[in-house]
Image (spheres, rainbow, N blue to C red):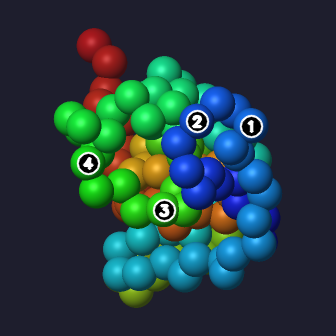
């Protein structure tokens, strides 16, 4: 699969498309075919290296940003209802959203509004 990653900190020019293996969902996780990824302030700050002294001193390189994704569940890990496959979802992740596929944490229902 293709994933946008950076191998060193810097301007947007450090981003490149790499071929990486498709992740597999673990217990309680979903495999999402990503159709949209958020580009947030944190993504830009991390790529530029402005958070490495405080929030992320041990960031593994290469790193794929993208902390929010939207897409369709393609597979599920052990302990997840198979009926989840095919559902459209949004998820917060720990990075890695700038890719074609991303495992995501389990779905959580939204609280009911009054």
Residue 103 percent across, percent down from the top left: 52, 66
| Separation of marks 4 and 3 at Cα, in angstroms | 12 Å
**Labelled pair 4, 2 in contact (Cβ < 8 Å):** no
Mark 2 crowd level (few <14, some 14–19, many ≥20, 10 Å Cα): some
| Separation of marks 3 and 2 at Cα, in angstroms | 13 Å
In the rendered view, does 35 fall on the left or right side of 113?
right
Please identify the quarter of the rendering in which residue 18 is found: bottom right
| Separation of marks 4 and 1 at Cα, in angstroms | 22 Å
Q: Secondary structure at mark 1?
A: helix
Please give the name of the residue rendered at 35% of the width and 74% of the height, measured from the top-left corner. 28
The mark nearer the N terminus, 3 or 2, is 2
**Labelled pair 3, 1 in contact (Cβ < 8 Å):** no
Please give the name of the residue rendered at 41% of the width and 62% of the height, measured from the top-left corner. 60
**Residue hosting label 1:** 13
Quadrant, the C terminus: top left
In the rendered view, does 43 fall on the left or right side of 59?
right
Mark 3 crowd level (few <14, some 14–19, many ≥20, 10 Å Cα): few
| Separation of marks 3 and 1 at Cα, in angstroms | 16 Å
- Identity of the residue furthest to the left in this view: 54
Closest to the observer, 51 or 114: 51
Please give the name of the residue rendered at 32% of the width and 40% of the height, measured from the top-left corner. 52
**Residue hosting label 2:** 10
């Amino acid at each position: 699969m293709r994933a946008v990653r950076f191998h060193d900190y810097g301007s947007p020019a450090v981003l490149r498309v790499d071929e990486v293996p498709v992740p597999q969902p673990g217990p309680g996780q979903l495999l999402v075919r990503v159709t949209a990824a958020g580009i947030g302030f944190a993504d830009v700050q991390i790529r530029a290296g402005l958070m490495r002294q405080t929030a992320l001193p041990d960031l593994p390189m290469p790193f794929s940003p993208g902390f929010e994704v939207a897409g369709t569940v393609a597979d599920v890990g052990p302990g997840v209802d198979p009926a989840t496959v095919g559902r459209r979802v949004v998820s917060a992740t720990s990075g890695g959203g700038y890719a074609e596929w991303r495992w995501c944490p389990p779905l959580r229902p939204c609280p009911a509004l009054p």
